[in-house]
């Protein structure tokens, strides 16, 4: 798929086919996140990949709206360091946003659907995933082949109009 097609095809997928992702494709998605830009090359993230059905089912319980995680072929937990510094937290979240988008586009390029979830229950997430006490699970990215329809460029996206969003020179 061309880059523009991957961008325009990406959508939130909440229902997945019951088939695994090839490990080389999952690694490619993770590599896209690893290569994402990061402020001063800090790379504050760690990724914990879950593919076992029982673990996915339990991981879905870390957020009240995360039920779709249970049906995914794989879910990536995005882990960040805890910090008392507002600046470090802001930079880490911006960097993680770039890593996330790189992974979502890489997945779409492979025809793999993606969704996302917050993490509310950090204790449960830590127990399931084993990350250190000085870290927290920021978000989850669930992956799999869409059960409803394959990814293809969306002709009329549900987005604010271009001219309403883009301001040239001034607001």
Image: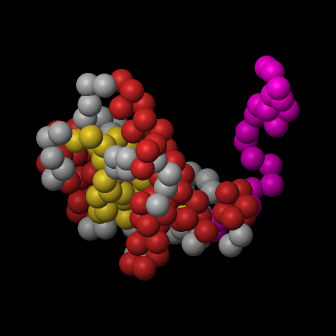
What range is drawn magenta here? 149-171
In which quadrant is the C terminus drawn?
A: top right
Q: In this view, does 118 lie above or below 25?
A: above
Residue at 58% x, 60% y: name it: 105
Q: Give percent across and percent down for residue 59.
A: 27, 51
Q: Which residue shows up at 24% across the image and 52% down it? A: 58
Q: Which quadrant of the figure has residue 65? A: top left
Q: Is residue 89 above or below residue 27?
A: above
Residue 154 among magenta residues: yes
Q: For this view, does 145 lie left or right of residue 53?
A: right
Nearer-the-camera pick, 36 or 27: 36
159 and 147: which is toward the camera: 159
Residue located 26% across and 31% down the image: 83
Asked whether 126 falls inside the magenta stretch, the response is no
Q: Indicate the position of residue 123 as horizontal and vertical percent values.
A: 17, 39
User: Does residue 33 appear anywhere in the picture?
Assistant: yes
Give the main secondary structure of the magenta stretch.
loop
Q: In this view, does 164 lie to the left or right of 131?
A: right
Residue lying at the far top of the rendered structure: 171
Give the image location of residue 115, x and y in percent. Answer: 49, 52
Left or right? Give the position of 35 relative to 56. right
Task: Give the image's coloring scheme.
Answer: secondary structure
Camera-nearest residue between 3 and 52: 3
Choose between 121 and 79: the one closer to the eye.
Answer: 79
């Amino acid at each position: 798929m061309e880059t523009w097609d991957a961008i325009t095809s990406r959508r939130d997928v909440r229902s997945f086919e019951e088939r695994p992702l090839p490990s080389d494709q999952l690694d490619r998605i993770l590599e896209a996140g690893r290569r994402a830009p990061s402020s001063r090359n800090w790379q504050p993230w760690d990724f914990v990949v879950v593919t076992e059905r029982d673990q996915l089912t339990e991981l879905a319980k870390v957020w009240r709206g995360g039920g779709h995680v249970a049906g995914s072929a794989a879910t990536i937990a995005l882990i960040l360091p805890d910090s008392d510094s507002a600046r470090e937290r802001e930079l880490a979240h911006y960097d993680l946003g770039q890593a996330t988008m790189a992974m979502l586009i890489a997945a779409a390029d492979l025809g793999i659907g993606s969704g996302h979830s917050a993490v509310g229950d950090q204790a449960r997430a830590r127990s399931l995933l084993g990350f250190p006490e000085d870290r927290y699970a920021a978000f989850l990215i669930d992956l799999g082949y869409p059960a409803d329809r394959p990814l293809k460029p969306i002709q009329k996206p549900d987005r604010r109009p271009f001219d309403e969003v883009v301001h040239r020179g001034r607001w």
